[in-house]
Amino acid sequence: MGMQTLRAQDPEKARVVTERAQDWIAEYGGEFPGDTSTGVLGTSEEEQARFEEFANEAACPALDPATGLCDVYEWRPMTCRVFGPPVRMGDGEALGCCELCFAGAKEDEIAACEMQVPHDLEERLVEEVGDTGETVVAFALLLDA
């Protein structure tokens, strides 16, 4: 939905974002632990384990390399909405966050910044578009035709 809107509002920016996504997939897609024709992440334990380390150092294709800003910020996926701030992981006990965002911070300082994940928003969005499986931003940008 976001790329459709971007194409209507700013076709040139949409073209550039699409090109970056295609380049990203050309470079990293061969190692994607899932179906590269659909962009859907595999569900096996092995594929899920491989995904933990998949392309972690690669810049997101939605980021403008000149400005560092997200070209699809208004329509960014849930993972982008919750990345960085401290959130409860798994069983709710462990508080995880981006180490780079909180370098040198004490545990109580990190805890004071805890974010509640908007699961209701994610559920509404999944209901709206249908559960198409997990993927990465590059595939999502190209599949949003």
Image (tube, rainbow, N blue to C red):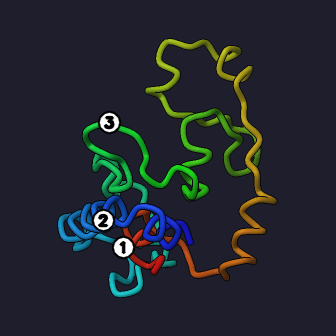
- Rendered location of residue 96, percent (x, y): 61, 36
- Which type of secondary structure does the marked residue at label 1 adopt? loop
Quarter of the image with the N terminus is bottom right
- Rendered location of residue 101, percent (x, y): 49, 25
- Which type of secondary structure does the marked residue at label 3 adopt? loop
Pointer 2: what residue?
Answer: 21
Relative placement, left or right, of 12 versus 134 is left
- Which type of secondary structure does the marked residue at label 2 adopt? helix
In front: 55, or 90? 55
Q: Earlier in the sequence, mark 1 or mark 2?
A: 2
Q: Nearer the viewer, mark 1 or mark 2?
A: 2
In front: 103, or 2? 2
Residue depicted at 57% across the width and 58% down the height: 75
Q: Which amino acid does label 3 sit on?
A: Thr
Q: Which of marks 3 and 1 is in front?
A: 3
Pointer 3: what residue?
Answer: 67
Determine the CA span between mark 1 and mark 2.
17 Å
Q: Earlier in the sequence, mark 3 or mark 1?
A: 1
Pointer 1: what residue?
Answer: 33
Q: Do the residues labelled 1 and 2 touch (CB within 8 Å)?
A: no
Residue depicted at 76% across the width and 59% down the height: 121
